[in-house]
Image (cartoon, rainbow, N blue to C red):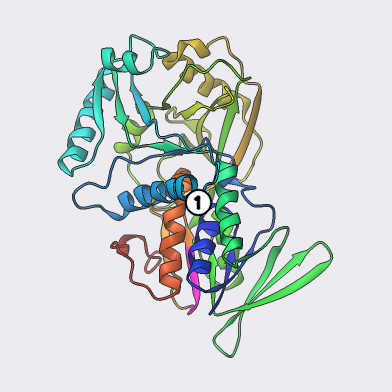
């Protein structure tokens, strides 16, 4: 069996590794470089919370991905900056506290490991936070890693297992053949190549929609710009990854309409909430971001950076006089209904889609790659993925 994977981000490289280790011939086609898009541009935070008593597919994507990162570092020996310290979601208001209480109670009833901690406990864990905060949700099992290093480690392992990764190779056409196989044509500088395969996996983030158009399929994934900033390196003072409860509480009350993705910070030009997440990297940089804007424009919005910086400073006062030293942005793949799309593309035997992971691509991508590889080779997934299949969601 031969498989073409389109996209060398965290999903594509993980899928390639799984397939190659099962003896499948794999070629990964990437128009840019490995980890050149959102997989390499995020803060590297991987949520967890534990498997619980009856893990859903959402839990499996997070915890399965966590296991794959740990395997990369501890079993395969890759330096990916793995840190097992955990994540704190900081709470400023009584309204956020009530939301957090309900959220943690619901998760703990399912056997998951989230904890609601008080101000005293929070300051004991992180003296760098604002001591007037009401507390935090602690995810003690959350981990973090360096995004570029981790994605490239998956690529290295995939190539060691026999996969071929071709960068600077933009896909220009996808055609069915009369023998029930597929042809994928690429353009690299002045050279054109054609690859033939039994199956093709779309793992190209927000560009999955462009790939779908090549075969007459409407893929309901759109580009959402995320942006981040980093400080100059500082003494190490922050142990945990940090998030804020503000946007999470707001999104819990959100009505979805399937015309625009849920969980954005802006509706058209109007900001509806502030969102942040980030950490201090091992080199001392503070790295934070959070805005989610429905656009293909990758221009960094300086006002959005300022809002995010001020939000961080409310929670971590030591940031107040520490300006951003650099900023950047990337495009994330948001599905219109807010759920990932993982499975065969209806009506197109041999085409598979693994996308729509929104802002959680790095945290859920390794398990997504493993699941789509299982489907391609005909293995029954260990988890019920019915809610994520593209059937009835691609019209």
Judge whether residue 394 can be spotted in this image: no
Q: Is residue 231 above or below residue 260?
A: above
Q: Position of residue 335 (x, y in %)?
A: 45, 53
Q: Which of the 4 image quadrants contains residue 210?
A: bottom right
Which residue is at 46% across, 52% downward?
A: 365
Q: Which residue is mark 1?
A: 76
Q: Which of the 4 image quadrants contains residue 297?
A: top right
Q: Position of residue 123 (x, y in %)?
A: 33, 13
- Observer-nearest residue: 347 or 363? 363
With 340 as the anchor, is 92 left or right in this view?
A: left
Rendered-image quadrant of the C terminus: bottom left
Q: Secondary structure at mark 1?
A: loop
* Magenta region: 348-353
Q: Is residue 90 above or below residue 26?
A: above
Which residue is at 37% across, 47% downward?
A: 62
- Observer-nearest residue: 160 or 5? 160
Which residue is at 66% across, 59% downward?
A: 30
Residue 312 inside the magenta-drawn segment: no
């Amino acid at each position: 069996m031969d498989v073409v994977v389109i996209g060398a981000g965290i999903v594509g490289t993980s899928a390639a590794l799984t397939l190659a280790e099962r003896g499948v011939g794999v070629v990964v086609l990437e128009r840019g470089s490995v980890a050149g898009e959102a997989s390499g541009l995020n803060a590297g935070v991987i949520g967890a919370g534990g498997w619980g008593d009856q893990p859903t597919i959402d839990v499996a994507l997070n915890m399965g991905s966590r296991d794959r990162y740990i395997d990369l570092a501890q079993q395969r020996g890759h330096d990916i900056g793995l840190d097992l310290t955990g994540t704190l979601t900081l709470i400023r208001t009584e309204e956020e506290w009530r939301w957090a209480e309900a959220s943690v109670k619901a998760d703990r009833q399912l056997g998951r490991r989230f904890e609601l901690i008080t101000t005293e406990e929070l300051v004991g864990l992180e003296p760098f936070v604002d001591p007037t905060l009401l507390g935090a949700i602690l995810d003690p099992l959350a981990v973090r890693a360096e995004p570029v290093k981790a994605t490239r480690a998956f690529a290295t392992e995939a190539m060691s297992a026999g996969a071929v990764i071709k960068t600077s190779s933009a896909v220009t056409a996808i055609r069915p053949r009369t023998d029930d196989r597929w042809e994928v044509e690429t353009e690299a500088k002045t050279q054109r190549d054609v690859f033939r395969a039994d199956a093709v996996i779309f793992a190209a983030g927000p560009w999955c929609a462009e790939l779908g158009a090549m075969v007459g399929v409407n893929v309901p994934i759109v580009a959402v710009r995320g942006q981040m900033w980093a400080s100059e390196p500082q003494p190490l003072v922050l142990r945990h990854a940090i998030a804020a409860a503000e946007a999470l509480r707001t999104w819990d009350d959100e009505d979805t309409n399937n015309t625009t993705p849920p969980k954005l910070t802006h509706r058209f030009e109007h900001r509806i909430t502030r969102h942040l997440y980030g950490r201090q990297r091992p080199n001392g940089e503070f790295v934070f971001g959070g805005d989610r804007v429905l656009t293909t424009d990758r221009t960094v919005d300086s006002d959005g950076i300022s809002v995010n910086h001020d939000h961080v400073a409310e929670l971590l006062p030591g940031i107040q006089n520490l300006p951003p030293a650099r900023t950047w942005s990337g495009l994330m793949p948001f599905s219109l209904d807010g759920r990932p799309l993982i499975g065969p593309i209806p009506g197109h035997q041999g085409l598979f889609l693994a996308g729509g992971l929104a802002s959680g691509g790095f945290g859920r991508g390794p398990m997504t790659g493993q699941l789509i590889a299982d489907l391609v080779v005909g293995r029954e997934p260990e988890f019920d993925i019915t809610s994520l299949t593209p059937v009835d969601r691609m019209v």
